[in-house]
Image (cartoon, helix red, strand yellow):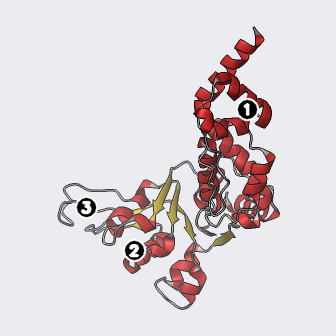
Amino acid sequence: MQIVANSRAMQHALTLLRCVAPHSISVLLLGETGTGKEVLARALHCSSGRRGPFVPVNCAAIPNGLFEGELFGATRGSYTGATTDRIGLVEAANGGTLFLDEVGELPPEAQAKMLRVLEEKAVRRIGDTKERPVDVRVVAASNRDLAERAATSVSFRPDLYYRLAGAVIQIPALRERKEDIPALIAAFLAEEGAPPMSNPDLDTFLHNPWRGNIRELRQAVQRYVVGCGAIGPVSRPRPSGAATQATDEEILLLVDELGANAAWRASGLSRTVFYERVRRARAVAEK
């Protein structure tokens, strides 16, 4: 998806992203949940000129005890069930970008080994005696204040923080970039193959606080398209849907009264069925 940046706050973030993209410096993306940190990390990778893959890792989704094997790999026999040598995600990203989402969830042991990857450009699999060189650009992301946690040494190593924070880019919350909301809505509607949003509905969307940021907005647009009516903390009254029992002629009258978009949502019908009935009604009316 194309990044929308009509707001000054988002333009500033993209300017920093373009500035650091061609270099090998580590980047730390900070922002609330749902602000699109992975989308920006992918954009950073695509602009970097690196030919290797983009490998995303959700650190919050890896169970405790599996971090080292997942990230750094393992040799056969290094633990119960290790029947073959296994490459880790760090090695999988060789020549490309490793994206550590929610990096603050890394346990202390994994933090120490990730620090070595950054400092020595090498990785050692569990059970191995030798290190393997890797060329990996690390982009990390967090919705927490890692600087404060590192300063107090609470669950995050200060030395790892400073290695990750080669460049720090703050991603603004959606409420801080309301100028971008109409374009984001238009993009999400296009993805759904839906018509443009009416001005009253757009105004309702603009005044929602969007505490879940872009992720919440996308889900709200999807609900809007299917006619559920709810957009989050604020809800639009949903029509009764009585038009599902209406004749084709009555549906055509509803279109003349409300407009096609609003009439479709009020009908309770799928978009395909609704527009087929409208087409059929108009064909009859023109005879």
Report whether 178 appears left or right of 246: right
User: 10 Å neighbourhood of mark 3: few (<14), some, or many (≥20)?
Assistant: some
Report whether 203 appears left or right of 66: right
Q: Is residue 80 above or below residue 222?
A: below
The residue closer to the viewer here, 6 or 44, is 6
- Cα gap from disc 2 to disc 1, whole angstroms: 62 Å
Q: Is residue 282 above or below residue 81?
A: above
Q: Which quadrant of the figure has residue 148?
A: bottom right
Residue 110's label in the rendered image is: 2
For the residues bearing labels 3 and 1, Cβ distance under 8 angstroms: no
Residue 5 visible in the displayed image: no
Report whether 121 appears left or right of 47: left
Q: Is residue 102 above or below residue 22?
A: below
Q: Which residue is mark 1?
A: 254
SS class, disc 3: loop
Residue 75's label in the rendered image is: 3
Mark 3 vs mark 1: give the one in front.
Answer: 1
Mark 2 vs mark 3: give the one in front.
Answer: 2
SS class, disc 1: helix
Q: Residue furthest bottom?
A: 152
Residue at horizontal 17 percent and vertical 65 percent from the top: 80
Q: Amino acid at mark 2?
A: Ala
Residue 223 visible in the displayed image: yes
Of labels 2 and 1, earlier in sequence is 2
SS class, disc 2: helix
The residue closer to the viewer here, 274 or 142, is 274
Q: Amino acid at mark 1?
A: Leu
